């Protein structure tokens, strides 16, 4: 499946912390930047952290498979090995998970590995993986 890259811009309250989190922790190469924003290559997609007041943690969530999923959130779907490697890296760095790495919908259509955590500004991220990418939109 070939898809065009998406673009997502979102607020952060500290560009240095965003640079460290997305650039170093998440391994996203940095693109253009200014003293007000930074572009990152988020697994082939363009995300832009914009310096802004406030916190991304607005307290909203929806129940999904026994967990309260933060809304809004964004993320990426990785292959299972890359997902496991990133989960181990985040765990080793003592990242606090909103929802710990686990398998969701186990034994059902759309079974997936998932984890939720927040960046230093409180923006929620979900990183997923499917053993079978053909089940991405399974019902």
Image (cartoon, rainbow, N blue to C red):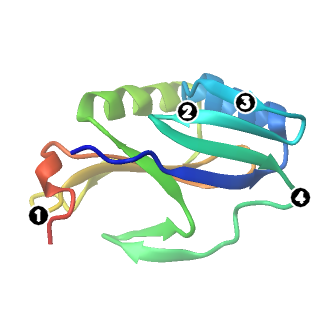
The tag earlier along the polypeptide, 1 or 3, is 3
- Residue 93: x and y in percent read 58, 26
The tag earlier along the polypeptide, 4 or 3, is 3
Pointer 4 with pointer 3, Cβ within 8 A: no
Rounded to the nearest whole Å, what is the CA distance between mark 4 and mark 2?
Answer: 24 Å
- Residue 83: x and y in percent read 34, 35
Depth check: give the residue in front, 8 or 137: 8
Rounded to the nearest whole Å, what is the CA distance between mark 2 and mark 3?
Answer: 10 Å
For the question of whether residue 126 can be seen, the reply is no
For the question of whether residue 44 can be seen, the reply is yes
Q: Which residue is mark 2?
A: 41
Q: Which residue is mark 1?
A: 108
Within 10 Å of disc 3 (Cα), the crowding (few <14, some 14-19, many 20+) is few
Q: SS for tag 1?
A: loop
Rounded to the nearest whole Å, what is the CA distance between mark 4 and mark 1?
Answer: 42 Å
In-image side of 96 versus 38 (left or right): left
Q: Tell me what residue is drawn at x 55 percent, y 30 percent.
A: 26
Q: Which residue is mark 4?
A: 53
Q: SS for tag 2?
A: strand
Rounded to the nearest whole Å, what is the CA distance between mark 2 and mark 1?
Answer: 33 Å
Q: Which mark is residue 32?
A: 3
Within 10 Å of disc 1 (Cα), the crowding (few <14, some 14-19, many 20+) is few
Of the residues tagged 2 and 1, which is closer to the observer? 2
Quadrant including the N terminus: top left
Within 10 Å of disc 2 (Cα), the crowding (few <14, some 14-19, many 20+) is some
């Amino acid at each position: 499946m070939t898809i065009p890259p998406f673009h997502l811009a979102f607020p952060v309250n500290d560009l240095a912390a965003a640079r460290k989190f997305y650039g170093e922790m998440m391994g996203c190469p940095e693109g253009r930047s200014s003293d007000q924003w930074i572009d990152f290559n988020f697994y082939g997609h363009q995300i832009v952290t914009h310096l802004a007041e406030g916190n991304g943690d607005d307290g909203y969530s929806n129940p999904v498979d026994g967990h309260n999923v933060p809304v809004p959130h964004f993320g990426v779907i990785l292959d299972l090995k890359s997902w496991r490697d990133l989960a181990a890296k985040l765990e080793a760095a003592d990242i606090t998970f909103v929802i710990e790495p686990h398998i969701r919908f186990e034994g059902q259509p759309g079974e997936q590995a998932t984890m939720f955590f927040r960046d230093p500004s409180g923006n929620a991220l979900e990183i997923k993986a499917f053993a079978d990418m053909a089940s991405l939109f399974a019902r």
